[in-house]
Image: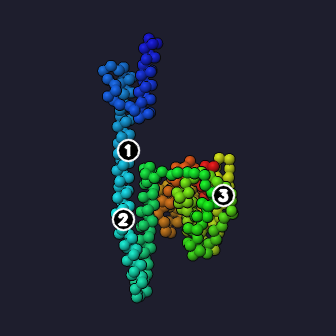
């Protein structure tokens, strides 16, 4: 009896190992020669393999769809922006100039939204793979500050950072995207002539990049939700934005073994913290 039970456990273990290793094949087993438990295990593993295959097929279709959307919208949007720029160079009355400027603004928003959705979809479906390497946090912060300064200058906002000699494990291009989204929000929701501070601190296992602002802040009940897709705070609903930047930032951080947190007080500002593996 013990011998028969041992053989049964060995066969069940082999079936499970095949399922884990991706080498399970239903044809390898004759159900008429299996015990009741083995037969149930066989049907479960067969269904699991079929489900995995269907998931992979759906991911492939989604990757193809995302690629098609990106390709099909690129040229029309570029043409709209080009024609709008040419229109603005003509002799227009004040109302026409305002309309042309609005067309350009809305087209740029649409272009940004499509690009962000494409990036998010490619991350979620595994089309893009991040390649974290040891890199300079100071260089990362500098790259992001250079991108955000034009917008900050328009609002007379000071963006400051203390130089640091810290390295972390991250993908420079994608992490710059994640950090830019956070800093861009800080500038967007801060009052004119205020300050945004970016600082890095090294802990035992992580490097923390803090982005502090003195903007509108986030209600306490909404703070756990701000990293959700298309989520926007109730106190900024009337301002520009689509609510996907922080979601993308979180995806990028988690893909590299990091995470993002936020502390905020309404009317006093927010402190977003991006943690990267050390």
Give the labeled residue for mark 2: 73
First in residue order: circle 2 vs circle 3: 2
| Residue 66 position within the rendered picture, expressed as x and y whole percent measured from the top left | 38, 56
Using the rendered view, name the quadrant where residue 103 is placed: bottom left
| Residue 115: x %, y % from top left | 43, 62
1 and 3 marks in contact (CB < 8 Å): no
Instruction: Give the quarter of the image for residue 8.
Output: top left
**Left or right, 86 with reference to 225:** left
| SS category of the residue bearing label 2 | helix
Q: Can you identify the residue that label 3 sits on? A: 200
Disc sitting over residue 56 in the figure: 1
Q: Residues within 10 Å of mark 3 (few under 14, many from 20)?
A: many
Q: Residue at x 43, y 59 (%)?
A: 117
In this rendered view, identify the residue nearer to me: 153 or 139: 139
The mark total stands at 3
Tell me what residue is drawn at x 43 percent, y 54 percent.
Answer: 122
Task: Report, in whole angstroms, how far the alpha carbon at label 1 lies from the one at label 3.
Answer: 39 Å
Please tell me which of labels 1 and 3 falls first in the chain: 1
Q: Secondary structure at mark 3?
A: strand
């Amino acid at each position: 009896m013990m011998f028969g039970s041992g053989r049964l456990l060995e066969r069940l273990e082999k079936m499970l190992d095949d399922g884990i290793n991706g080498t399970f094949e239903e044809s390898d087993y004759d159900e008429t020669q299996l015990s009741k438990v083995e037969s149930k295990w066989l049907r479960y593993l067969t269904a699991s393999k079929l489900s995995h295959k269907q998931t992979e097929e759906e991911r492939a279709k989604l990757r193809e769809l995302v690629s098609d959307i990106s390709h099909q919208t690129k040229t029309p949007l570029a043409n709209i922006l080009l024609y709008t720029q040419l229109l603005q160079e003509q002799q227009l009355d004040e109302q026409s100039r305002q309309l042309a400027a609005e067309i350009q603004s809305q087209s740029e928003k649409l272009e940004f939204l499509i690009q962000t959705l494409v990036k998010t979809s490619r991350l979620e479906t595994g089309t893009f793979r991040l390649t974290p390497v040891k890199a300079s946090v100071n260089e990362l912060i500098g790259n992001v500050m250079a991108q955000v300064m034009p917008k900050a200058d328009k609002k007379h906002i000071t963006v400051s950072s203390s130089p640091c000699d810290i390295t972390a494990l991250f993908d420079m291009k994608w992490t710059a995207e994640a950090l830019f989204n956070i800093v861009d929000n800080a500038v967007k929701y801060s009052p004119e002539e205020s300050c945004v501070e970016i600082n890095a601190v090294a802990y035992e296992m992580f490097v923390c990049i803090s982005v502090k602002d003195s903007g509108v802040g986030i209600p306490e009940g909404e703070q756990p939700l701000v990293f959700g897709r298309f989520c926007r705070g109730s106190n900024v609903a009337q301002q520009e934005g689509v609510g996907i930047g922080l979601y993308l930032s979180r995806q990028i951080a988690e893909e590299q073994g990091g995470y993002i947190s936020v502390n905020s007080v309404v009317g006093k500002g927010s402190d977003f913290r991006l943690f990267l593996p050390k």
